[in-house]
Image: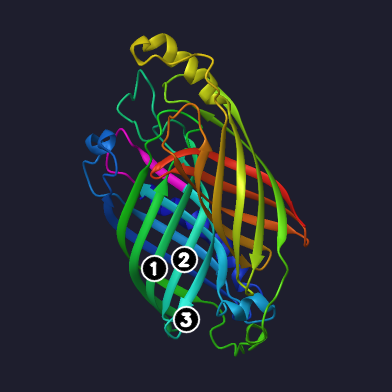
C-alpha cells in the first residue's frame, strides 16, 4: 500500500499538468512487470532467489511533425518514467529509478519500442559488514537503462487503452565503486494507457526530406572524456579516468553516420592495481613499472535524433602493456549537440558484459 501511495503522489502532478491545455499531445501509462534476473555471471547466482516485480509509470509527449526529425522517425513520443522494482532478494534490496525516454512506433502505431536512460537508487548496496553478499551493486546511486516492447491499443474507451509486452532493465554502477557485477531483469509486462483530450483532432504533418539524397562531407571529431572508477579490489580507492578520442565520421543519410577513429586511455585505476598485483601475487611476475595506459582503434555508428544522437562503437587495443580486460572493448552512449559543432555526451565503456567506466565527454565536430 505504501508503494501505491508513492506512485499516486508522483503521478498526480503530471496528470494536472497534462490536463491543462494538453490539446491531444500528452499520454500517461502504467505497466506492471514480472520476470527473472538473467544469471550472466556465476558471482550473482546466489542472489537470484525469486522473480522480480514492479511498475513503470510514464508521462509522454506526442509529436506530430512540426520538426523534420519527428516525421523522419514516424512521429515518436518523448517523456519521463518512474520505475520501482522489488528484486525479491533481501541482499539486493529494492530499486527506484527516474528516466528520460523515447517511444518509437511500428505496425500502424500499434507496436511501441521504448528506450529509457536514467539513474536509479538501491536501498541495500554492498557493505563488508552488513551486506557482504551483494556483489551486484557497490553503490546506492547508479546509471540504469531499460527497453520496453509493447503491443499497444490507445483510446479504446474514454481515452483509456491497454498494452502488453516485454521489458529489459539493466542496473549497474559502472565500476565507479566495487563490487559491480550488475543485474539484468527480463520481464513480461501489462498495463493501461490514457490519452488526454481524446476528441482533439490532431493532424500528422508529412515531410519528405529523406527522399532527397542527403550528403555531407567527412567530418573530424575530437572528444575529451572523463570519469571515476575503482579497480577490482573491494574497498580500494577511487581513481580519475581520462580519455581522448580522434575520429572521422561520414554522414550518409538524415539519420546515420559511420565512424572510424583512435582512442587514447589513461585508466589511473590500473596504475594502482598493477602495483597491488606485483606485491600481492608475486607468482604472476607483474612488473610494478608496467605502463597502465592504452591505445585503441574503433569503428562506430551514430544515429541522429533531433539534437540528440545515439552512439555505438567497437574497438580493439593496439597498445596494452598490462592485459587486464581482454583486447576488445565497446562504447554505447548518447550525445547532445549544442549547435552544429559542439557536443556533450555520456557513454558506458565495457568489455563484453563487464563495465569499465561511465564516461562524460565534451567535443567538437569540424
Q: Is residue 66 left or right of residue 303?
A: right
Residue position marked by numbered label 3 in the rendering: 159
Between marks 2 and 1, how big is the CA–CA gap?
6 Å
Report the number of numbered marks: 3
Is residue 9 shown in magenta? no
Between marks 3 and 2, how big is the CA–CA gap?
21 Å
Q: Is residue 6 left or right of residue 20?
A: left
Q: Within 10 Å of the Cα at label 1, are there few (<14), some (14-19), or many (20+) other Cα atoms?
A: many
Q: Is residue 105 above or below residue 358?
A: below
Question: Residue at position x 72%, y 71% from top?
Answer: 216
Question: Residue at position x 36%, y 68% from top?
Answer: 191
As rendered, which of 76 and 220 lies closer to the eye?
A: 220
Cβ–Cβ below 8 Å for labels 2 and 1?
Answer: yes
Mark toward the start of the polypeptide (2 vs 1): 2
Which range of residues does the magenta coloring cover? 86-96
Residue position marked by numbered label 2 in the rendering: 114
User: Where does the image place residue 215, in percent across and percent down from the top left?
Assistant: 70, 75
Amino acid at each position: 500500500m505504501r508503494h501505491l501511495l508513492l506512485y499516486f503522489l508522483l503521478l498526480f502532478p503530471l496528470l494536472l499538468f497534462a490536463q491543462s491545455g494538453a490539446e491531444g499531445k500528452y499520454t500517461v501509462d502504467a505497466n506492471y512487470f514480472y520476470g527473472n534476473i538473467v544469471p550472466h555471471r556465476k558471482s550473482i547466482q546466489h542472489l537470484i532467489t525469486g522473480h522480480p516485480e514492479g511498475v513503470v509509470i510514464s508521462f509522454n509527449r506526442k509529436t506530430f511533425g512540426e520538426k523534420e526529425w519527428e516525421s523522419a522517425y514516424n512521429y515518436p513520443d518523448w517523456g519521463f518514467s518512474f520505475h520501482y522494482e522489488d528484486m525479491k532478494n533481501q541482499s539486493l534490496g529494492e530499486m527506484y529509478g527516474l528516466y528520460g525516454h523515447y517511444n518509437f512506433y511500428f505496425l500502424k502505431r500499434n507496436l511501441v519500442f521504448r528506450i529509457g536512460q536514467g539513474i536509479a537508487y538501491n536501498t541495500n548496496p554492498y557493505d563488508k559488514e552488513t551486506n557482504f553478499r551483494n556483489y551486484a551493486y557497490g553503490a546506492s546511486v547508479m546509471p540504469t537503462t531499460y527497453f520496453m516492447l509493447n503491443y499497444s491499443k490507445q483510446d479504446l474507451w474514454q481515452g483509456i487503452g491497454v498494452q502488453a509486452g516485454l521489458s529489459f532493465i539493466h542496473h549497474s554502477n559502472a565500476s565507479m565503486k566495487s563490487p559491480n557485477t550488475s543485474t539484468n531483469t527480463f520481464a513480461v509486462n501489462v498495463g493501461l494507457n490514457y490519452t488526454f483530450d481524446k476528441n482533439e483532432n490532431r493532424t500528422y504533418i508529412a515531410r519528405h526530406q529523406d527522399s532527397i539524397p542527403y550528403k555531407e562531407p567527412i567530418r573530424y571529431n575530437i572528444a575529451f572524456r572523463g570519469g571515476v572508477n575503482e579497480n577490482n579490489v573491494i574497498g580500494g580507492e577511487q581513481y580519475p579516468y581520462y580519455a581522448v578520442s580522434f575520429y572521422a565520421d561520414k554522414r550518409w543519410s538524415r539519420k546515420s553516420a559511420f565512424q572510424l577513429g583512435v582512442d587514447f586511455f589513461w585508466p589511473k585505476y590500473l596504475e594502482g592495481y598493477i602495483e597491488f598485483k606485483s606485491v600481492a601475487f608475486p607468482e604472476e611476475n607483474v612488473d610494478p613499472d608496467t605502463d597502465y595506459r592504452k591505445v585503441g582503434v574503433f569503428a562506430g555508428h551514430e544515429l541522429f535524433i533531433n539534437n540528440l544522437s545515439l552512439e555505438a562503437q567497437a574497438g580493439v587495443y593496439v597498445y596494452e602493456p598490462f592485459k587486464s580486460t581482454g583486447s576488445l572493448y565497446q562504447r554505447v552512449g548518447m550525445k547532445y549537440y549544442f549547435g552544429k559543432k559542439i557536443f556533450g555526451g555520456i557513454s558506458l565503456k565495457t568489455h563484453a558484459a563487464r563495465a569499465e567506466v561511465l564516461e562524460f565527454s565534451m567535443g567538437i565536430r569540424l
